[in-house]
Image: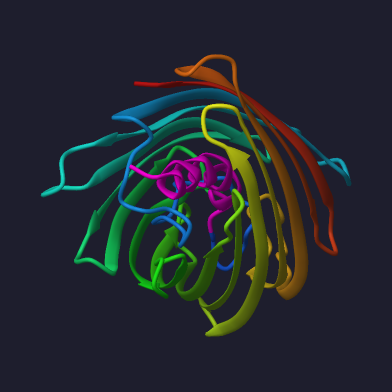
Amino acid sequence: MNHKYYLAMACAAVVWPSMVLADQAGSVDTVDAPPAETASVVAQPAEHGSVQLGYGYSELTDNNAAWNDVFARGNVGLGDSVGVLNWEVSKQRHFGESGQAISASLTRDLGPNWYGSIGLGLGSGADFLTKRRVDVAVYRKWLPQRNLITGLQFTGSRSGDGVYSDKAWQASSSYYFASPLVAEVGVKRTTSNPGDVNTMRYYVAGTYGVNKQYSLSARYDTGREGYMPQGFSSPAVNFKSNVATVSWRQWLSPRWGYELQAERYHNPSYNRKGVTASVFYDF
């Protein structure tokens, strides 16, 4: 397994928490089941797998209650014929409500230059959680060293209150530089219902790291959302928002370490600032 595969899993570890800001009726400001992997994730686990346990806390403006999240996530290699299984379970309290979410996705090679992913997420106990979500993605490796990866992903989801639903298409491109750096860009088009509200979002992300030592990741996501997250009696429609995330992953030994993440989100109605701390173990 070469350094690109190791770095890709480091990318997955730091991109995953920021990507779990899943759509609820076109809203990115909802912690939810993780989607199918981004283009920077390949069908290879770190060692044979990993487990991560963490806690997240966020403060919101305009008299909104703070967020509290507890989660466990990980991945395990099931062999070349099956692929890599990613999973997550979480307990979340947002906007004064508490709920649980569970998700799993499978990533596997489809040939020398192709790999794909399929994922399912379920939430219960709170309106802000997506009740169910399905992700399907396919990726293509390009260039002689296969260090350029493009991807196309479809996501379908329904909100916990049963009122809203989303259908989204995302295109992404990742480039692995000669140094331990991965850069990624992407665009997503979402149709939210009721009302056929169409929105576009764009993101840039990068990860720099050395396997079994450290990795630093940053991501910026901006664009429009279909509906305001749950917690508002009269949600806004088709509004602009942005979210910035920075993560640091530090190995303390070849097997385990910690990860710290800071995030800032803004929309016309409120701001959110949050931190997440976790420990991980590779096996």
Q: Which residues are magenta?
A: 1-22
| Whole-percent x, y for residue 55 in the image | 61, 24
Is 77 within the magenta? no
Q: Main secondary structure of the magenta part?
A: helix
| Whole-percent x, y for residue 145 in the image | 41, 66
Identity of the residue drawn at 68% across and 39% down:
247
Residue 3 in sight in this render: yes
Q: Is residue 44 above or below residue 98?
A: below
| Whole-percent x, y for residue 98 in the image | 55, 32
Left or right: where does residue 34 sit relative to residue 83? right
Is 2 within the magenta? yes
The part of the image, by quadrant, that contains residue 223 is bottom right
Work out whether residue 33 or residue 281 is closer to the camera in this orientation and state it. 281
What sort of colour scheme is used for the picture? rainbow
| Whole-percent x, y for residue 102 in the image | 37, 38
Identity of the residue drawn at 52% across and 85% down:
196
Work out whether residue 152 or residue 231 is closer to the camera in this orientation and state it. 152
